[in-house]
Amino acid sequence: MNGASRAKLRTKTGCLTCRQRRKKCDETFPICGNCSFSRRDCKWPSGADLVDRRYSSHSHSRHREVVVKPRRKPERTDERHTDLDCIRTTYPVVDIDVEYLDACWHCHPEFHDGWLAEIQKLMTTHKSLYYSVLANAASHMYLVDGAWRLQNLALTYYADAVSELSKLLDRVPQLENHNGLLMSVMMLYLHGFINWDTGLDIPQHVTAATRILTLRLLNHPSPIGKLFDRLAIESVMFQMFTYTTGLWTDIKAAVDPEFDSSFWDRAGKLLDEALFFPDAPKSFNSPVLGFPVSLFRTALSLRHCFRSRRSPGIAELERLQSEVGDWEARVLCDRELRSCSPSSGEWDKLDSREYCFRDASYLFAMVTSLLLEQVGNSDSIPDLLPQVVPYDSWQLRLSVQILERHAGDEEWTRCYGCNWLVYTLGLFMDSSEDRHIIREEFSRRWDLTKFVQIARYSSDLEDIWAARDGNVARILGRATKPQTQAQLAAIRFVH
């Protein structure tokens, strides 16, 4: 018999629940570690499920094979509903949109489970949340499968969500107490985080969420009492950080984009007091930020120095030096890190996620240390972009060491909080070997998450490297539309 005509066994292993959620399964039967930890139903494939879908009829996509669409009524002809059925039955829609919550930080599962339960309950009664969830799901499917009609569908649902949100705002008397409203706004700025075309809308959605949370929490002396409220504050702060730092080549504005420093400082103090699980590691209490708030604030201050081309004042410089100095000392005193022996000593006491969190924090510290060196010199004006540092810089070498040790670590690769760090670290590099490490890191991150932010960072970094290398052709050939540029970068990743 011709070998090409035989049905082959699939090479992917693990339970169906992990495979559907795109998680690495430890294959513990009958209940794997992931499902046990998140309290999900652990389902395993039957013999028929193990046949490789590549050997089925080519007239059917891989999704149509496993999707059983509900029977439609004859009068239902809207193509959007057909696609909606596909989205509903192909993917666990809500799981896709909150993937970053349980895949990146070692937070308590109650954060994730409570968020999911609330979404599932409220999206049945609030159209704005319903459409915003569908917009995110369609965008994710487009990035995974490349079906252009899903991109158009995502933008249609996004517009529907905005329209329904506007109606909701007109009839809700107390905005701060309406979880459906807040969740809708959060899902809309998350859409800008993963979609090509709605990134410019992020600031207005973040501003709306900021005002809601200010009314709900910051204007009251009482501490945070609900897990969801902590998650919401951290989510808004992370989006503020991502938008404010922006791309390093975005030098049009003389000052930072709109940034509510008062909200950031007040929210940071509130988070310090809201430890729902005090006996657990600090990262266990942080569902979105993961890193200490002080590291984000330090990075924002340094980013402002570059954008405005101003050195920090004396008081600000002393604060930055103290903050960064504490982290530098912590890194340099870690013998396991410097000796490349993560399997001995204190590291044995950490599970994989806490280990990932520790190294990510170290990487954050090294990046801020390099930035501070270039803005802390009072005898010179900071450049608009961070400059190349010597190859043997201790911060650079330790950062590269961290990236290399996590090259095969899916836990690390899914950590969205490191995307800006990897991007910024690349600006300090001049050698082809170090740049290759950054390219490989971004490639793995794109393959696993399909976050558009990664494509934007990678493309911008390639342009900066090309300019430094005198590659005028690449600069002149740069796409004029940001979304086109990001799409081209994504295509490079895919191929």
Image: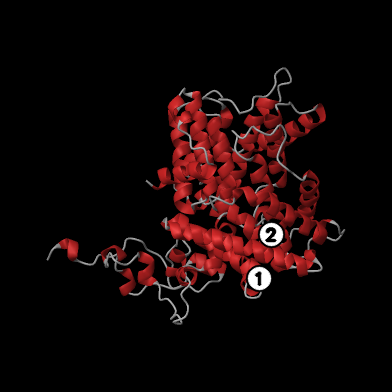
Residue 123 visible in image? yes
Q: Residue at x 42, y 69 (%)?
A: 16
Residue type beneath disc 1: Glu
Q: Position of residue 360 (x, y in %)?
A: 59, 44
Q: Position of residue 293 (x, y in %)?
A: 71, 46
Q: Which mark is residue 277?
A: none
Residue occupying the far left of the picture: 1
**Front residue of 263 and 377:** 263
Q: Which residue is mark 2?
A: 231
Residue occupying the far right of the picture: 221
Labelled pair 1, 2 in contact (Cβ < 8 Å) = no
Image-based side of 314 in relation to 399, left or right: right
Residue 435, compared with residue 17, is above or below; it is above
**Front residue of 350 and 240:** 240
SS class of the residue under badge 1?
helix
Q: Residue at x 56, y 63 (%)?
A: 157
**Front residue of 225 and 442:** 442
Residue type beneath disc 2: Leu
Q: Which residue is mark 1?
A: 118
